[in-house]
Image: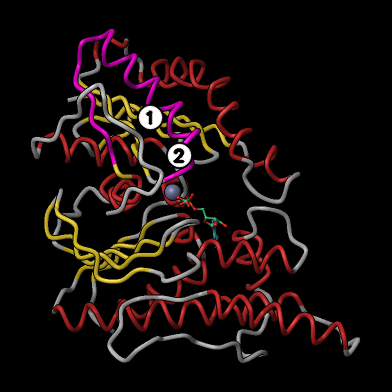
Amino acid sequence: MKTLAIETSCDETSIAVIENGRKILSNIISTQIETHKKFGGVVPEIASRMHVENISQILKSALEEANINLDDIDFISVTQGPGLVGALLVGMSFAKALSYSLDIPLVGVNHIKGHICANYLSHQDLEPPFIALVISGGHTYLVDVSGYDEYKVIGRTRDDAVGEAFDKVARALGLPYPGGPMVDKLAKTGNPEAINFPRVYLEEKSYDFSFSGLKTAVLNYLNQMKLKKETISIEDVAASFQMSVIDVLSEKTFRLLKETKKNKLVIAGGVAANSGIRDVFTKKAIENDIELYIPTITLCTDNAAMIGSAGYYSYISGNKSMLDLKVDANLSL
Ligand code: KG4
Ligand code: ZN
């Protein structure tokens, strides 16, 4: 079964062709990062406009690379939310037009489920049940995934998402948007123990997260150092901030695995590309006898292939959307 998948929730216009939810026949990703960089973050109106300008050409490339025609497609998967409403609308309208004209089913997909399903594309042997840690620019979730279309949220952020904290700290360090990859790079040569930034664990036993206090602590540290006219090692700030994030993420994730007696962990979302997170989680997974799955780097950040995989499992579970399907900027898991 071949799925044509469309993702336009933020600043990547992407279209993929996926076979049986697991095999990528094509996955074209056109990123707008260079445009938004000038503004220090994503400008929603520009994002929507660029999706409109690019989407037809991306469809053409996705079909060419997969070496198929539109007639070979069995159904369309499209991101319904969460994301920027104007950006989502471009992909949704395009998907509806294709579904109507080709007379094939349409399936609306939750972007966060898509991030989790990126792991089915990177790891052919992966099957639920497992615990998923979703860490992206807009979301931080601990999820109990008991089946291919069964998700239960166990913990979530109460303020900033992990990626958001990375991007805000990067900005304070004078690094360009999106700062996550730059913080990752700097952290490699910094000392993670140089500055003792707070670890916010919230109430005992809580699986929720809070990263705004950490972000403020980094900003306060930078301001104090500037006032005292002391030299700041941005490598040490990056490494110490990143280690604080890793400590909190890993404490809660491995505690949940222990409590639920699960031995399989999936990490997903843009921040799963972080080398410090990948290293520490790999080490802890071995120590705790946990099978760990993380997508290949290109499937961590936004792409349509993951939407194709999530759409396939939703479709075979009996879900099909109508042509009056509405985008939902705040769609929850
Ligand atoms: O999943 P994603 O592409 O978009 C959302 O759905 O939000 O995630 C983008 C986020 C950005 O905040 C970016 O800075 C962060 O992922 N990111 C990283 C790394 N690569 C991307 N954060 C830390 N280290 C990285 N290597
Ligand atoms: Zn995303």
| Residue at 41% from the left image edge and 55% from the top image edge | 269
Give the secondary structure at mark 2: loop
Residue 85 colored magenta? yes
Residue highlighted by disc 1: 6
Quadrant of the snapshot with the N terminus: top left
Distance from the alpha carbon under mark 1 to that under mark 2: 9 Å
x and y percentages locating residue 80 in the rendered image: 33, 37
Residue 252 disc label: none
From the image, give the main secondary structure of the stretch colored magenta.
Answer: helix
- Is 58 placed above or below 120 here? above
Horizontal side of 11 relative to 139 (left or right) equals right
Q: Is residue 94 magenta?
A: yes
Q: Nearer the viewer, mark 1 or mark 2?
A: 2
Q: Is mark 2 within 8 Å of ligand 2?
A: yes
Closer to the camera in the image, 79 or 249: 79
Disc 1 on helix, strand or loop?
Answer: strand
Mark 1 Cα-neighbour bin, 10 Å: few <14, some 14–19, many ≥20 = many
Three-letter residue code for mark 1 = Ile
Q: Are marks 1 and 2 in contact (CB under 8 Å)?
A: no
**Residue 225, quarter of picture:** bottom right
**Quadrant in the picture for residue 47:** top right
Q: Which residues are magenta?
A: 83-109
